Image (cartoon, rainbow, N blue to C red):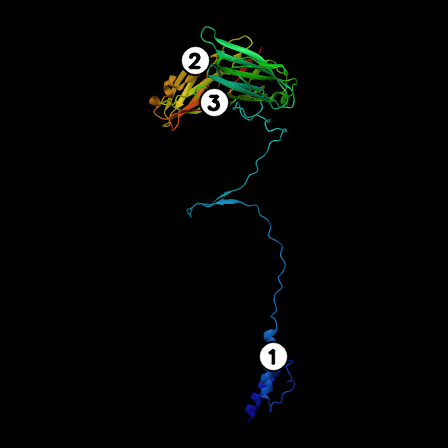
């Protein structure tokens, strides 16, 4: 009897703890427990717990993650290959002089890309069916005087013939004419005589100021076209920049100090001669005395490397200029070297050379196509051109 009473008091105490403040049970009679009131109070307590929201943790504000510079990672397919990571590198820029065509020359004598002080057109042709459109552009905002000379090989009797003329260009003016027709502009007192045959054109800037920016202002382009068969070749003139201030002295010193040097070697990737294709090698000397009309004669050394890296050689001698078809050079024939493509290296002995290759190849329809092939230049060799 005493044990049952203690159990009832213990249960009543526990219920009092849980139900404190939740219902009308403030005092509990241990001996007389109203179990209906206990169950009702317990239901109310459970309902209150179920409807009350659970406490939630308030998130602590955090700062955004730092911005990182993107990198590019190339992971090769094999999993055991090391990962290669490319890190972007900032390329330093040269200060601009205000016009795209102006800038320092970083190579010896590339094909015309920058405004220059001395231009050479190695291939000019004008005859009954062929003519050449020549274009000179003054890239500066000042008047420019340009001293030019046509030179052609008139044969073993007459030798080299030259025709000199002066062109006056207004600021930012392009000046264009046909070599075979010549031109005359009374507004600028500019006249270019008609030209016949196959030859070259050399032009030097004669500025009114000694400043370097007054020299490097000229760009040029030529288009040779044949009305009889539609054969067309267009190329940019080879440009040499002036490197120091000073007046034009009628002597163009291509020594790498006053003007850019001439290239020591010319490199071409060419198609060898075979049926349906017969390209032409155009060469003209850097060294020239136009004042005393002394023709330049030089030997030409040629090295030809076929696709199997077999080396062949050849040599020629010419005066004034030359236009050699590949059929006349045995080591540039496919029947001799055995491959369709060859690496041609050209070097002048008595004078460095300027030149180009006119690629001729057969198309799918059997017709012949043409393209100008500019060389990659190697090294430097000093030379001089003397104007009257």
Residue at 53% of width from left, 45% of height from top? Answer: 71
Q: Marks 1/2: CA distance?
A: 117 Å
Residue situated furthest top in the rendering: 157
Which is nearer the eye, 197 or 121? 197
Check disc 3 and report its element: helix, strand or loop.
Answer: strand
Q: Nearer the viewer, mark 3 or mark 2?
A: 3
Which residue position holds label 1? 45
In the rendered structure, the answer to whether residue 254 lies left or right of residue 339 reads right
Residue 234 rendering spot, x and y as whole percentages: 49, 23
In the rendered structure, the answer to whether residue 288 lies left or right of residue 303 reads right
Which residue position holds label 2? 317
Quadrant hosting residue 252: top right
Whether residue 115 is situated above or below residue 10 in the rendered picture: above
Residue count near mark 2 (Cα–Cα under 10 Å), binned few <14, some 14–19, many ≥20? few
Which tag, 3 or 2, sits closer to the chain's start?
Answer: 3
Q: Is residue 47 visible?
A: yes
Residue count near mark 3 (Cα–Cα under 10 Å), binned few <14, some 14–19, many ≥20? some
In the rendered structure, the answer to whether residue 154 lies left or right of residue 211 reads left
Quadrant hosting residue 301: top left
Residue 204 rendering spot, x and y as whole percentages: 58, 17
Which tag, 1 or 2, sits closer to the chain's start?
Answer: 1
Residue at 45% of width from left, 15% of height from top? Answer: 322
Which residue position holds label 3? 233
Which tag, 1 or 3, sits closer to the chain's start?
Answer: 1
Which is nearer the eye, 342 or 123? 123
Check disc 1 and report its element: helix, strand or loop.
Answer: helix
Q: Nearer the viewer, mark 1 or mark 3?
A: 3
Whether residue 281 is situated above or below residue 66 in the rendered picture: above
Residue 135 rendering spot, x and y as whole percentages: 55, 21
Picture quarter with the C terminus: top right
């Amino acid at each position: 009897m005493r044990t049952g009473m203690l159990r009832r008091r213990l249960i009543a105490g526990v219920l009092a703890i849980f139900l404190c403040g939740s219902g009308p049970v403030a005092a509990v009679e241990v001996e007389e427990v109203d179990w209906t009131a206990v169950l009702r109070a317990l239901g109310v307590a459970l309902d209150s717990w179920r409807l009350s929201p659970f406490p939630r943790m308030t998130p602590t504000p955090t700062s955004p993650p730092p911005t990182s510079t993107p990198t590019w990672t190339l992971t090769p397919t094999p999993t055991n290959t090391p990962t290669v990571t490319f890190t972007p590198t900032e390329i330093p820029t040269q200060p601009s002089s205000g016009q795209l065509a102006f800038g320092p020359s970083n190579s010896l004598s590339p094909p015309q890309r920058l405004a220059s002080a001395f231009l050479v057109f190695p291939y000019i042709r004008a005859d009954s069916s062929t003519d050449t459109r020549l274009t000179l552009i003054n890239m500066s905002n000042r008047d420019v005087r340009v001293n030019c000379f046509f030179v052609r090989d008139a044969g073993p009797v007459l030798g080299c013939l030259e025709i000199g003329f002066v062109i006056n260009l207004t600021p930012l003016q392009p000046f264009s004419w046909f070599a075979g027709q010549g031109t005359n502009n009374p507004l600028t007192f500019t006249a270019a005589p008609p030209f016949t045959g196959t030859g070259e054109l050399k032009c030097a800037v004669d500025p009114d100021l000694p400043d370097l920016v007054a020299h490097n202002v000229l760009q040029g382009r030529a288009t040779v076209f044949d009305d009889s068969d539609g054969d067309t070749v267009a190329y940019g003139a080879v440009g040499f920049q002036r490197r120091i201030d000073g007046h034009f002295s009628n002597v163009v010193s291509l020594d790498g100090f006053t003007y850019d040097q001439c290239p020591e070697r010319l490199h071409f990737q060419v198609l060898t001669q075979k049926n349906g294709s017969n390209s032409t090698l155009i060469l003209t000397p850097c060294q020239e005395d136009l004042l005393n009309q002394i023709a330049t004669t030089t030997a030409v050394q040629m090295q030809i490397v076929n696709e199997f890296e077999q080396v062949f050689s050849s040599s020629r001698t010419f005066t004034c200029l030359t236009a050699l078809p590949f059929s006349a050079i045995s080591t540039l024939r496919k029947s001799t070297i055995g491959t369709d493509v060859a690496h041609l290296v050209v070097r002048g002995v008595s004078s460095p050379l300027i030149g180009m290759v006119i690629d001729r190849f057969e198309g799918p329809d059997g017709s012949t196509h043409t393209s100008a092939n500019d060389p990659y230049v190697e090294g430097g060799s000093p030379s001089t051109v003397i104007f009257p």
